[in-house]
Amino acid sequence: MLQIKVVGTGCPNCLKLKSLVEEVIKVQNVPTQIESITDYNELANLGIFITPGLIVNNKILSSSKISTKSTLEHWLSKIN
């Protein structure tokens, strides 16, 4: 099961990233747990200082940008 954390403050970019991740997961039909991290202290503890951030299985895949759908598909297919 993939453990995905979408890290951000709830800003529009953070919500967009979460939506894209959910779209990709739905298409790939992979068992996944998606968690939204919005607490500033936890963001810092995770190593994300500029949002949005994406962490999959405890590995930071992106920070400070919205990854494209094709990039997310590529990353998640390699991890799965």
Image (cartoon, grey):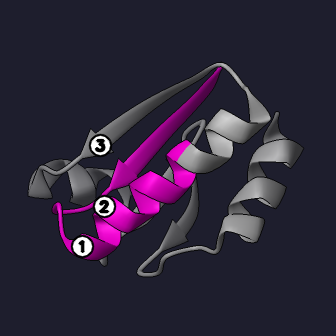
In the image, what residue occupies the spot 51% across and 38% down? 4
Q: Amino acid at mark 3?
A: Ser
Q: Are marks 3 and 2 in contact (CB under 8 Å)?
A: no
Is residue 23 magenta-colored?
no
Is residue 17 magenta-colored?
yes
The dot on residue 15 is 2
| Residue holding disc 1 | 12
Instruction: Find residue 2 and report its horizontal and vertical position in percent.
Output: 63, 28
**Mark closer to the observer (3, 1):** 1
* Residue 62 placement: quadrant: bottom right
Q: Amino acid at mark 2?
A: Leu
Residue 41 to residue 49: above or below = above
Instruction: Find residue 66 and report its horizontal and vertical position in percent.
Output: 49, 76
Instruction: State the CA–CA distance, disc 3 to disc 1.
Output: 13 Å
Residue 11 to residue 21: above or below = below
The answer to whether one can see residue 49 in this image is no
| Residue holding disc 3 | 36
* Residue 80 placement: quadrant: top right
Q: Amino acid at mark 1?
A: Pro
In the image, what residue occupies the spot 64% across and 38% down? 25
Q: Are marks 1 and 2 in contact (CB under 8 Å)?
A: yes
Seen from this angle, which residue lies furthest left?
40
Q: Nearer the viewer, residue 24 or 80?
A: 24
Mark 3 or mark 1: which comes first in sequence? Answer: 1
Instruction: State the CA–CA distance, disc 1 to disc 2.
Output: 5 Å
In the image, what residue occupies the spot 32% across and 74% down? 13
Residue 14 to residue 3: above or below = below
* Residue 16 placement: quadrant: bottom left
Instruction: Find residue 57 and report its horizontal and vertical position in percent.
Output: 60, 36
Q: Secondary structure at mark 2?
A: helix
The residues colored magenta run 1-22
